[in-house]
Image (cartoon, rainbow, N blue to C red):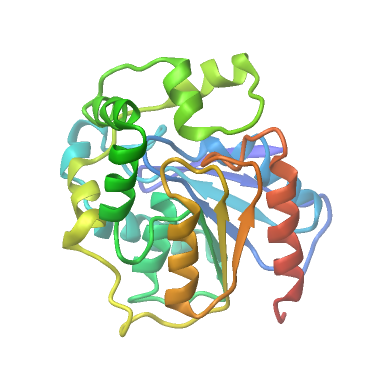
Amino acid sequence: MIKKQNIAGLEVFSCLPDTPTSRPNLLFIHGAFAGAWMWTETYMPYFAAAGYPCHALSLRGHGDSDGHDRINWLSVADYVDDVRMVIEALAIDPVLLGHSMGGFVVQKYLEHHAAPAVALLCSVPPQGLIAAQFHLLLQKPQLYLEINRILAGNYTETDTLKEALFAGEVDEKMLETWLGRMQNESQRAIWDMSMFNLPNLYCMQKAPMLVVGAEMDALVPAFLAQSTAQTYGEPCHILRGMGHAITHEKDWTKGAALILNWLETLKP
């Protein structure tokens, strides 16, 4: 069962195993334009059923968290503080799993805080967004323009969303629901991820790391996932036939199973 609470103005969902467990807590961190809702229908029940207590927060200005009125002024550092506050309030030491922008937030979190392990899922690379932006502009200029319209808070359509996030078959009702939940993103955070606040690799506290990319990802291409893995000296796992929204692709369980297998290798 998914339970929702408010922690210091932040929306937090939790999904716990049916029986007590010694396995580590998981904290899921969403990407741009999204919220904690992106984890509640697939990954959280899946990992809770496998014995892992699961939590997901909506960063400030996202979902039902406070801060929508000032979202364009929110920084990646603000998002890192959100993660820290939720961890302290829940009194947990969780494995961090970040998708897209959430993966970038995880990398910035490691500059000041330790984590037992982290998973970067279709994550913005430590070198920032510039390469991804130019790749999208050259490969799909119309999609690039549409994403910038979303960033400005303008409405889009399901066809654009499908092209941006999915590679396989997509349920139209799910697409419409996803579209209805999407929102604009902080302009400041986008600039932080582009060039102004990139991860300081020399300050980051090392942790066991899983790097996952998607073969058909239009937003964070597979070669950038490989670059992230190379930067951290880790293998890169590419999910074949999938787009950016690995949590909601038709074969989403393949990615979840990959993460679960990795979690099982971690030392207790």
Q: Is residue 109 left or right of residue 133?
A: right
Residue at image point 64% right, 31% down = 168
Residue 10 point in image, percent of width and height: 39, 44
Residue 140 point in image, percent of width and height: 35, 33
- Quadrant the N terminus occupies: top right
- State whether residue 199 is above or below residue 152: below
Q: Is residue 230 left or right of residue 168?
A: left
Residue sitting farthest toward the front: 138
Residue at image point 54% right, 39% down = 245
Residue 102 point in image, percent of width and height: 42, 53
- Quadrant the C terminus occupies: bottom right
- Residue 78 in sight here: no
- Residue 129 in sight here: yes
Q: Nearer the viewer, residue 63 or 162?
A: 162
How many marks the image carries: the answer is 0
Q: Is residue 68 left or right of residue 10?
A: left
Residue at image point 39% right, 63% down = 84
Q: Is residue 183 left or right of residue 230?
A: left
Q: Nearer the viewer, residue 197 or 39?
A: 197
- State whether residue 86 is above or below residue 111: above
Residue at image point 59% right, 73% down = 235
Residue sitting farthest toward the right: 19
Residue 242 point in image, percent of width and height: 61, 41
